[in-house]
Amino acid sequence: MSHPPLADKFTHMVFIETPTFTRLVTHLLTDDEYRGMDKTLFEDLVSSLQEAKAIAKGKAQPSRRFEVARPDAKAVREQIGLSQSEFARLMQVSVKTLQNWEQNRRTPTGPAAALLKIMSAAPEVALKSLHT
């Protein structure tokens, strides 16, 4: 049994945006492009959501998969062999911030996350660069 496209069931659509969506979409579409979103694009969005649901339930495979590993500050610190206070000083953060990272209450971001990756991959180079 074939169903009509979901967008055909609507005579009027209202998009309710989250603040995050609004912030992101303004970088991708002009106001005119956003207002001109047609039924085809709406159907594509609905189809994508249905695919995501099927993937989440294990009924379909994603076309690509990305995993982002959070930097393990404690493992990096122990690998280098520094105390929390020494490592915090090296990272130019407070000991409390480092403890929050190590206990997974917070996640390092930006330059701190990048520095942790470098320290993990090449500790000698990182330490030499930071101590000069």
Image: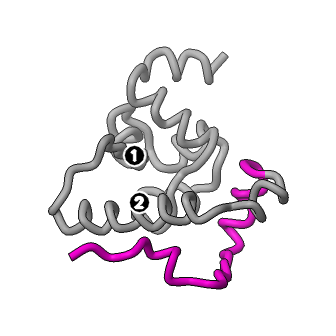
Q: Residue at x 75, y 51 (%)?
A: 29
Looking at the image, residue 78 sits to the left or right of residue 86; the answer is left
Q: How many angstroms separate mark 1 from mark 2 (CA)?
A: 22 Å
- On whether residue 59 falls in the magenta region, the answer is no
- Looking at the picture, which amino acid does disc 1 mark? Val
Instruction: Provide residue 131's location: percent of width, then percent of height.
Output: 62, 21
Quarter holding the N terminus is bottom left
Q: Residue at x 43, y 38 (%)?
A: 82
Q: Is residue 12 above or below residue 45?
A: below
Instruction: Provide residue 40's location: percent of width, then percent of height.
Output: 55, 59
- The image's mark for residue 68 is 1
SS for dot 2 = helix
Q: Which residue bears the numbered disc 2? A: 48
Q: Nearer the viewer, residue 50 or 57?
A: 50
Q: Earlier in the sequence, mark 1 or mark 2?
A: 2
- Looking at the picture, which amino acid does disc 2 mark? Ser
Q: Residue at x 64, y 81 (%)?
A: 13
Quarter holding the C terminus is top right
- State whether residue 100 appears in this view: no
Looking at the image, residue 114 sits to the left or right of residue 51; the answer is right
The image quadrant that residue 114 belongs to is: top right
The image quadrant that residue 58 belongs to is: bottom left
Looking at the image, residue 87 sits to the left or right of residue 54; the answer is right
Instruction: Provide residue 23's location: percent of width, then percent of height.
Output: 74, 62
Instruction: Provide residue 61's location: percent of width, then percent of height.
Output: 21, 50
Which residues make up the magenta segment?
A: 1-29
Circle 1 Cα neighbour tier, 10 Å, few/some/many (<14 / 14–19 / ≥20) = few
Question: Which residue appears farthest toward the left when viewing the image?
Answer: 59
Q: Nearer the viewer, residue 83 or 6?
A: 6
